[in-house]
């Protein structure tokens, strides 16, 4: 297809990734992960992740260019995640990307990683319809976004007030003895269990002060309730019905995510819901969303898993949207922002 050729670079957490996108076509996509190095610590260790980025940066970018049969001179612009994420990790990717832009005299765009998770769906489903809702869920984010114009106008409809959904799964998984990241283990066991076995509170909140944000989430109480129940049984010397614990947790989290996402679509008259982030691999969430979407007449777009987890294609695709919309590049001294809203 036509359109700008963008090199996208991603280093917000434990994936070092680079991709080339032309217009809305994915040309190459390379991901290196330091996940295995973190497994024995039960979570991502920022120092280890930053070192891994420093090692992987040049090989990953070179492979993305080589797979595209390109060198830097063929690129129209570079896009890089400037936040949110781990500061040390962002610093490696952004410094690397700035150096490439400077050396090759190319424009550079520091982009918002979470919006990249929305943008990437265009590679699979085509252009975003007007008035689109997006649910982005991972170990680091749980956001409901309303998109009028991906390059210029995005509204935060709701977010988590504490733990992200994936983080909640990972913490319960750790308690049950599963290795990090535990989300996929919970998913697998949940399919075998009884979702009504435990009373797990819903990750509902009344919304922030003034009730102007009824679409926020809160998962820390969910995690605590499950932890108390499991610890109580252990203290009583009873064994833990792991499948039932997983099924009850998954049911609670998946139903609140899908219910609020569909409610948000209704409130804005959106008939498209985009879903992204690593947690969208979750089978309970997929089932709940498919059913709720069918009932509400909402087209639920969940891309293939490799586009849902952190990657360079999402960054390049958003860069392509920005260039196409005529948005000015970032200045060469643009900051990283680990808490980017
Ligand atoms: O987007 P991602 O790869 O990394 C970030 O957190 O940014 O998402 C990883 C998160 C982890 O919390 C992992 O446990 C969770 O997504 N996850 C799952 C599943 N696959 C990945 N959680 C539940 N069910 C799954 N099938
Ligand atoms: Zn992410």
Image (cartoon, rainbow, N blue to C red):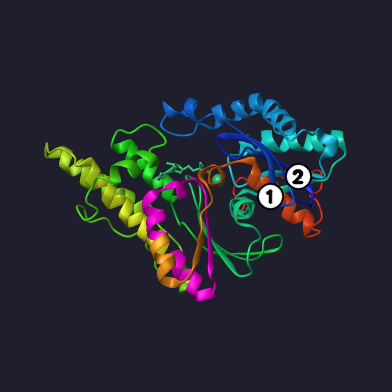
Return the mark for residue 97.
none
Residue at disc 2, secondary structure: strand
Q: Look at the numbered disc 2 and say if its residue's Cβ is closer than 8 Å to ligand 2.
A: no
Q: What separation in Å lies between label 1 and label 2 (alpha carbons)?
A: 8 Å
Vertical placement of residue 323 versus 130, above or below = above
Inspect the magenta stretch and tell me whether residue 287 lies in it. Answer: yes
Label at residue 6? 2
For the residues labelled 1 and 2, say whether their Cβ atoms are less than 8 Å apart.
Answer: yes
Quadrant including the C terminus: bottom right
**Residue projecting furthest to the right:** 105
Describe residue 337's horizontal placement relative to residue 310 as left or right.
right
**Above or below, comparing residue 147 to residue 139 in the picture:** below
Of the numbered discs 1 and 2, the one sitting upstream in the chain is 2
**Left or right: residue 103 compared with residue 229:** right
Q: In this view, does 98 lie above or below 4?
A: above
Identified at 57% across, 45% down, the residue is 307
* Magenta-span inclusion, residue 243: no
> Which residue lies under the disc numbered 1?
317
Q: Residue 158: x, y in percent?
A: 50, 63
Q: Residues within 10 Å of mark 2 (few under 14, many from 20)?
A: many
Q: Is residue 128 left or right of residue 216?
A: right
**Left or right, 316 with reference to 125:** right
Indicate the position of residue 337 as horizontal and vertical percent values. Answer: 65, 47
- The answer to which quarter of the image holds residue 324 is bottom right
**Which residues are drawn in magenta?**
260-289
- Tell me if I can see residue 214 in this picture: no
Residue 65 in view (yes/no): yes
Q: Which residue is drawn at 81% across and 43% down?
A: 332
SS for dot 1: helix
């Amino acid at each position: 297809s036509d359109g700008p050729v963008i090199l996208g670079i991603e280093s917000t957490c434990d994936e070092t990734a680079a991709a080339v996108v032309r217009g809305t076509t994915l040309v190459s996509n390379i991901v290196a992960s330091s996940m295995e190095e973190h497994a024995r610590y039960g979570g991502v260790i920022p120092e280890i992740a930053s070192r891994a980025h420093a090692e992987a940066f040049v090989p990953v970018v070179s492979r993305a260019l080589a797979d595209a049969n390109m060198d830097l001179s063929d690129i129209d612009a570079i896009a890089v995640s400037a936040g949110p994420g781990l500061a040390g990790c962002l610093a490696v990717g952004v410094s690397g990307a700035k150096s490439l832009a400077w050396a090759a005299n190319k424009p550079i765009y520091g982009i918002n990683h979470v919006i990249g998770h929305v943008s990437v769906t265009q590679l699979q489903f085509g252009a975003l319809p007007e008035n689109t809702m997006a649910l982005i869920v991972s170990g680091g984010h749980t956001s409901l976004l309303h998109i009028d114009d991906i390059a210029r106008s995005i509204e935060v409809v709701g977010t988590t007030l504490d733990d992200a959904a994936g983080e909640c799964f990972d913490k319960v998984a750790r308690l049950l003895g599963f290795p990090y990241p535990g989300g996929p283990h919970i998913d697998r066991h949940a399919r075998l269990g009884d979702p009504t076995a435990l009373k797990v509170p819903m990750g509902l909140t009344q919304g922030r002060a003034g009730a102007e944000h009824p679409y926020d989430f809160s998962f820390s109480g969910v995690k605590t309730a499950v932890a108390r129940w499991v610890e109580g049984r252990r203290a009583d010397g009873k064994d833990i019905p792991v499948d039932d614990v997983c099924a009850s947790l998954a049911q609670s989290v998946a139903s609140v995510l899908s219910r609020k996402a569909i409610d948000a679509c209704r409130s804005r008259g959106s008939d498209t819901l985009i879903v992204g982030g690593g947690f969208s691999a979750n089978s309970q969430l997929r089932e709940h969303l498919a059913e709720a979407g069918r009932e509400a007449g909402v087209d639920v777009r969940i891309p293939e898993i490799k586009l849902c987890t952190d990657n360079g294609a999402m960054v390049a695709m958003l860069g392509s949207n920005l260039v196409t919309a005529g948005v000015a590049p970032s200045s060469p001294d643009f900051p990283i922002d680990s808490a980017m809203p």
